Image (tube, coloured by chain):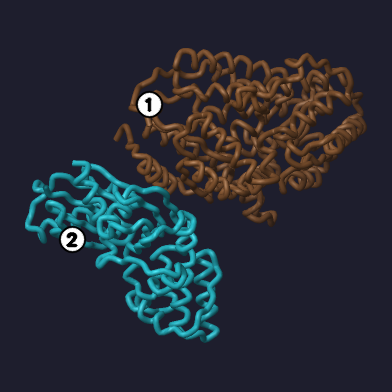
Chain colours: A brown, B cyan
Amino acid sequence: MSEVKKYKTEPLKTWQKAKELRQKYYRDYATAHERGGLRWSGGAWCFDAIPAGLGDDVYPITGEPYAASCAFNRSFSTECLEAAEKKGWARDLCSYMRNYWGSMYLNKFAFGGEYPKADFAFQNHICCSHAKWYQHVAEYEKIPYFCFDVAVGPYSEVDENRLSYLVNQLHEAIEWLEKTTGRKYDDEKLIQAVYNECRSTAMWAEICCLNRSVPAPLDEKTMYSLYVFGTLQKASREVADFYEELRDEVKYRVENQIAAVATERCRLMSDTQPPWGFLKVFRYLEKFGALSVGSLYSFGLIGIWEDKPDGSWGPRTTPQEQGVKIETRDQALRILADWNLSKPEWQHFYDPQLKSDMMIRIAKEWKLDGVMLHYNRGCEGLSLGIAENRLALQEAGFPVMVFEGNMGDEREFDLTRTMSRIDAFMETMELKQLER
Amino acid sequence: MITAGIDCGAKNTKVVIRKDGEVIAKSLVLSGFDQKAAAEEALEMALKEANLSKKDIEHVTATGVGMKQASFANDTITEVGSAAKGTVFLFPSARTVIDVGAEEGRAIRADGTGKVIDFAINEKCAAGSGAFTEAMARALEVPLEKMGELSLKSQNAVPMNAQCAIFAESEVVSLIHAKTPKEDIVRAVHDAIASRITSMVRRVGIEREVALVGGVARNVGFVKSMKEDLELEMLIPEDPEFVGALGAAIAAAENR
């Protein structure tokens, strides 16, 4: 571990724009009907490029980031969770789903006013909650629902048959959308959305790569507010353009040694969704000169990656960079399906070893000193196998601390004890608080 | 050189004073609600025993859940760090430390210098700590200090499967109603704690020698259950509840 050194630091210039973009996203959704537009609801991993073909006035609300916003507001979240429990749902179900459902039952929108009911639900399925989440939404709100299955196995095993299985469902989805909304589908808009998605998700991976620098230009708490756009509307031009602007700023920070944390001396990564109501744990790390520079979660939830010729992990080369011209609906859907199936965070649904390999790779390439794993009771999908990841990381020589919690249910998180765990972990790495 | 370590635990506050590497005084008071007062009282008691005054102490290091209440301390060390230091000082061959106190159970792997390599702590659950034994003693109407001896009389292992102290209490009530002998129920309580602690120990990896410290190590019934569960002998110090304070006192000498 290096000597304590003070790097220069400054706030992100694009921060304000990020805030405005996020507010606009939720406002656009809530007010879509006023402009004669459509609203749809689905998961953050759903292919928003597909409904984009219905027109420029079709606005999504993605469930997980919306639920994370609910969870960030702890009193509102408790109201939502209790409303879900009142309906008889068990507390060990996905806490995003329970927050979302609670908000729907209460008819309260986290950003003010009544809950803006969607015109249709559009979802894909890979974890145990995805399909059921929106099946219930559709039944409760009495709206049409389409769900497609993306669980075709790890990307290394994807062949023509598996790809076609997904692509055929996407063709069916477009027919369903036309029939459900009564709108004519525009393939040109789909093609543009696919280009946008490839650009935004590869761009996010490029931004994450810049965090290999010492000092890190971004800390993970800040990254949570930035990666979110890829979970909101990755196929929009606005998001792709924003990421390009952000990439330029982060690049500037790297070139000028502008640190996220001035006293950086210990680089960590976390894992899975954080306890959203308690992001202060990340600020607490800074007292020791430690920071989380990212995680497989924040890098790979929306970022699309590939192996680079030098052996490193980097942004996947986009079709446009390869000079591929998309000309037909089928070609667009094939590219979209293939692109998404290579998503890092989808790989470990099939084997925790795949996740361990990626985590170890991050730990080495991002020059980490340790790892902080969140045993997240709120998400079975991303937490399954995490104990095995811990063993693999330790075997690879990285100190690991674990803490229990829940991304969206504050009642399952103990802040004081988590701080004590961090104290003990820092002590094992011979780090003392820089300020008292 | 005179240094002191104070362990502000959930139930008891302990102080150890060392002079030139030797322990010269110890004190223990109930932590109660006013932990700050308890810390002052414990220090005063130890100083009195050592025939010293506060100004004679070169450096004080605090540990324990209430460590911030020891406002006279020069610095702090975590419970994990102090348990490892204290144990390896007492037993230089110890590499795995099991520390079971009133509030928490901890499994720690340490090196020969007392430096922590890995640790696990029971999370939001009292079922791996002394608080659980206390609650069960109340439910069984058995004085806490008699729990250990009573369980040694048991001839039957009764499974207690609940993973939570609250559900375990309801299991105890069911066993009482089923006329299960008290000694068997007490043994079941100790077996249940031991099983939770053992699972934590396995998580950090068992490396010999294994030492058991913390106040619950005074409970002979729990010690028996732990030995059976781990299938090995454990090193247990004479005053297991003082190991954290001792570790803090050692840290005080290092940090002065």
Q: Quadrant of residue A169?
A: top right
Q: Quadrant of the N terminus of chain A?
A: top left
**Relative horizontal placement of residue B27, taking residue A316 as reference (left or right):** left
Q: Nearer the viewer, residue A234 or A97?
A: A234
Q: Which residue is mark 2?
A: B26
Q: Quadrant of the C terminus of chain A?
A: top left
Using the image as rendered, state which of residue B117 and residue A99 is in the foreground: B117
Identity of the amino acid at label 1? Thr
For residue B126, above or below residue A252: below
Label 2: state its secondary structure. strand
- Assign a secondary structure to mark 1: loop
Within-10-Å neighbours for mark 1: few <14, some 14–19, many 20+: many
Packing grade of label 2 (10 A; few <14, some 14-19, many >=20) is many
Q: Residue at x 33, y 27 (%)?
A: A3
- The residue at the point 55 percent across, 78 percent down is B174
**Amino acid at pointer 2:** Lys
Q: Chain of mark 1?
A: A
Residue A263 badge: 1
